[in-house]
Amino acid sequence: MDYFLELLFGGLTRGSIYALIALGYTMVYGIIELINFAHGEIYMIGAFTGLIVAGLLTMLGFPGYSILIIAMICAVIWAAAYGYTIEKVAYKPLRGAPRLSPLISAIGMSIFLQNYVMLSQTSDFLPFPELIPEFEFMKGMGSMLSSSEMVIVVTTIMVCIGLTLFIKYTKLGKAMRATAQNRKMAMLVGINVDMVISATFVIGSSLAAVGGVLIASHIGQINYFIGFIAGIKAFTAAVLGGIGSIPGAMLGALVLGLTEAFATGYVSSDYEDVFAFCLLVLILIFRPSGIMGKEKVQKV
Amino acid sequence: MDQQGFVQSFLAAGCENFAEALKKSALAAVWFVFLTFPIMVIKVDTIDKTVVWRWENMAYIALAVFFGSFLWRWMLARKELKKDEVKQETKVESFLTMIQTTPAIKYTLLVIIGVVAAIAPLKFNIMGDKFQLFNLYQTNIMISCLLYIVLGLGLNIVVGLAGLLDLGFVAFYAVGAYAYALCNMHWDIGFWYMLPVGAALGAICGVILGFPVLRLRGDYLAIVTLGFGEIIRLVLENWGEVTMGPSGISSIARPGFFDMKLGVIGSTNYMYYIMIGMVLFTIFCVNRLQNSRIGRAWLALREDEIACQAMGIDKMKTKLMAFSLGATWAGMAGVVFAAKTTFINPASFTFWESAIILSIVVIGGMGSVRGVIAGAVILILVPEYLRDFAEFRMLLFGAIMVLVMVFRPQGLISAKRKIYEYKATKTAGAPNE
């Protein structure tokens, strides 16, 4: 039972992180129908920015909690800036091009960002300072549920609620929904579509950066390659839930996280990543629109 | 356009005047300095508690972006202008067409290339002087370049002709390589027997992957094939009893030549000629395929899947053919790769290998044989000769992929369809005007 609970909490933590990254995928896909391959790299850049800022602040002798908050804010700012710039440089000139072109451009961007971080930092694993201190009140459950896992899950829930409210009630959120439905019509009723697309990239990147800092401090080490696998898995989660749908991405991420945790716990830990890929292939074959997605009628 | 006009239009491209362009560039420089500040300037070591500040990087970025943004805007403006113009051949393109259409020049060039390629790795004694075009090292590089040409042409069938974005191409390459390595290790089967077997295995795997993903296309297909490639790699890495895991399989036999014993130089040269033969064979096959019924069906499928079905093309058969034929070349290339390096491990079959092959196809020009060859030569040979930039290789790959897509989506050498022009003569009843 203890083992089961441990796996359950582990799965929830994984699922939360996947959800934070998957939201970015699903939002971008919902609006411009592009798989932003570089999204995983933005998560990685968020984690690196967090590491650099946290390292600087630790040396300057800041207290624990403020380091976490400042590092998080800096990571969000820079990741958002990267997301914005990537959209402007690699995707915006390709609006209206055949579908293959922006996808290849996105893969190129992803390769570029990985090597950029590798060359300017290092290719080694870097230790990430533990930003989330152990809590006192978790003594009974402490062996199964660490405080950082708890922070991750709670933060994700808060972010998801906040995002849902944002999309539902704010003016920008409404504009985003309108653009996702029909870009041309949105433009006709006076929505600044370019601005909405940029905003989507900025919000998605910020969420990825939050996930990056949290998971890096949980695992304790990062390198330039972490974005690739995380990106693929988050994409799997987004597809699982039905790409383009925000609640779908959260659900899909949870399903993926739990599947992975139980599969590695009870089957084999060697094939950790294989389970996610197999799940992805199976889902795409049997239900390409995902759990909560709608079947799309193909237009000629 | 006169000289002055050109300079002015270059400097103020996309802006009202030069002052505004200057302002824009300065802003871009400031923005990129901000963007790259934490990653490029600060390097923190959390164990030794040291910080390295690299301010010089900031200056490089500022300068590069300031001047680069002029170029960027100018290129974008030029692209916009070109959209409106009637499509005209550029000078390079018309030069290439001229070579293509004049048989005398075309065949002389082919003969020259053929002779140079044939004698390149050999050593000659001309009047006491040792003369050799390629030394051992260069021959080796040429072999890998030729290998990438074969791989690129294989992927070109799937991506360029049929328009199916396959990001797991390296899986078939791995299948071929491991098939040869394992058969050679356990049963001592030779290279020449395994070459067709590797091709067949590749084709079978292509069908196996093709079947479940027939319904998918575009982005979904890309992700599934990527997942498939990663599954193969992870299995190779973890299935230790069969594949030897991450340590790989070593001392794989080189190809034999009628029981003759070949030294290192001899077998490298032999490998080189095998590759030349294979490239010629591939080009021949791809050319024939392109103009065949199935090739035209691929092109139709790439352009519009639904219209294509309406015209009575069997979508399933056509897609499976594309997958399996593409995979055939990968399987063969895998066998050659294992024989060439005599050592393989899963590290040779990562996603980045797929990305390199894809960028060869994309940068060279999707669907064009000459384009793929040019792409492989540029992307494989140039980094080898610019050893100093070796570590920047993948960075440049990424940047070039983005830039080519933004400014020249059809690649360096775009595919050309055969066009038959109908010229009415007066005697044969010219159309009334």
Image: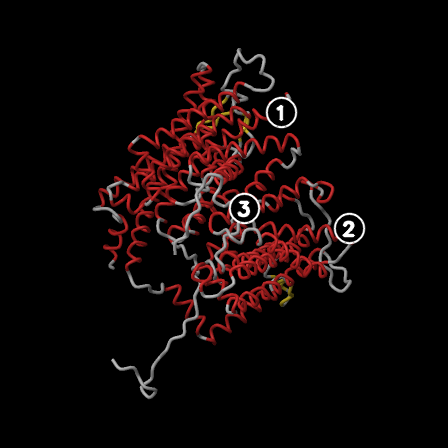
Q: Position of residue B56 (x, y in %)?
A: 41, 33
Q: Position of residue B383 (x, y in %)?
A: 52, 50
Question: Label 2, on which residue?
Answer: B186
Which residue is more in the foreground, A46 or A119?
A46
Image check: A267 left or right of B371?
right
Q: Are marks 2 and 1 in contact (CB under 8 Å)?
A: no
| Residue type at numbered disc 1 | Phe
Image check: A297 left or right of B181?
left
Which residue is more in the foreground, A186 or A230?
A186
| Residue type at numbered disc 3 | Phe
Which residue is more in the foreground, B87 or B412?
B87
Locate the C terminus of chain A and report the quarter of the image it occupies: bottom left
Question: Label 1, on which residue?
Answer: A4
Q: CA distance from mark 1 to mark 3?
A: 29 Å
Q: Is residue B350 above or below residue B258?
A: above
Question: Which badge, 1 or 3, comes first in the chain's sequence?
Answer: 1
Q: Tell me which residue sits at (47%, 24%) in the image.
A: B51
Of helix, strand and loop, which one carries label 3?
A: helix
Determine if marks 1 and 3 fall on one subunit.
yes
Q: Tell me which residue sits at (32%, 38%) in the image.
A: A196
Q: Is residue A119 above or below residue A211?
A: below
Of helix, strand and loop, which one carries label 2?
A: helix
Image check: B250 left or right of A75?
right
Q: Position of residue A184 (x, y in %)?
A: 29, 47
Q: CA distance from mark 3 to mark 2?
A: 39 Å
Q: Are marks 3 and 2 in contact (CB under 8 Å)?
A: no
Question: Label 3, on which residue?
Answer: A286
The quarter of the picture where residue A194 lies is top left
Q: CA distance from mark 2 to mark 1?
A: 43 Å
Which residue is more in the foreground, B138 or A252?
A252
Frontmost of labels 2 and 1 is 1
Q: Residues within 10 Å of mark 1 (few under 14, many from 20)?
A: some
